[in-house]
Image (cartoon, rainbow, N blue to C red):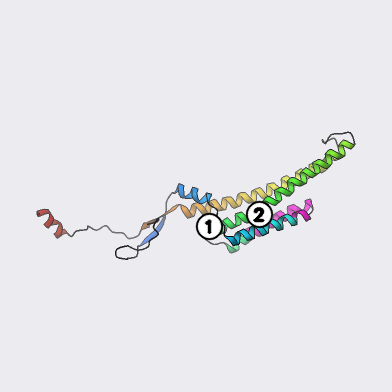
Amino acid sequence: MESSGRTSCEICNTEYKQKEIFSWQCNKVYQGCMQCKCSSTDISMVFLTFIMTIIVLMLSQIKDIFLLTAVSASTMFVSFIIFYSKDIASIDMLLWWKLAYSIPLWMIMFVEVEEKIDICNTQCFLHHQQCIRSCPYYQKVDTAWYISIKNIGFDAISIAIVLLCRSLIVCFKYNTKIVFDDYETKPLLAESDDQVDHHC
């Protein structure tokens, strides 16, 4: 019945009395976790978010990026709560939207740290030193590492929350099965007909 999607009998067209009950469906849950739906409208919004995030982060000072990350995560979660529907596509959209901000963030943080390391190597070399803690220019590298780890750590926690919420929704959605309600088993033949056949 679940595979055909029918709600009525093929022969008499009587509507099935059916209901959903809880049932462990590991294969369905696994398939649901692996599928991430995204419509053409969602793709457009994700791409726009990705481009805008890169531009905003490039124009922002590194010390202000944590505030942008916190505001972005809060906005996404509040928007999800307001516009949430029982369709799993809404949590999939939240995941894509989060990744559209997270990937540019990680890229900017990586570039920032690499840039500070290059500057440290150049300046320390001019002073006949290596880019280690004893060099005064290493402080900028240390600061860049600290800010990057703080931003990426906070962002990773946000992604983990989204994945946890998605896993819970998938579990509640797919750990069910459809059964007949008020179903009574009746013999195909009446008792009198059964007796006639018995004598035959």
Tell me the quadrant of the picture where the N terminus can be found: bottom left
Give, as a three-letter code, the residue at label 2: Ala
Residue that badge 2 annotates: 100
Left or right: 171, with 50 as reference point? left
Check the image and report above or below for 114 versus 158. above
Residue that badge 1 annotates: 88
Q: Which residues are magenta?
A: 57-78
Residue 113 badge: none
Left or right: 85, with 49 as reference point? left
Q: Are marks 2 and 1 in contact (CB under 8 Å)?
A: no
Check the image and report above or below for 139 versus 43. above
Tell me the quadrant of the picture where the C terminus can be found: bottom left
Name the main secondary structure of what is drawn in magenta: helix
Give, as a three-letter code, the residue at label 1: Ile
Using a 10 Å C-alpha cutoff, classify the residue at mark 1 as few (fewer than 14 neighbours), some (14 to 19) or many (20 or more). Answer: some
Residue drawn at the location 14% of the way across and 59% of the way down: 193
Left or right: 193, with 44 as reference point? left
List x then y, in percent, for residue 94. 60, 57
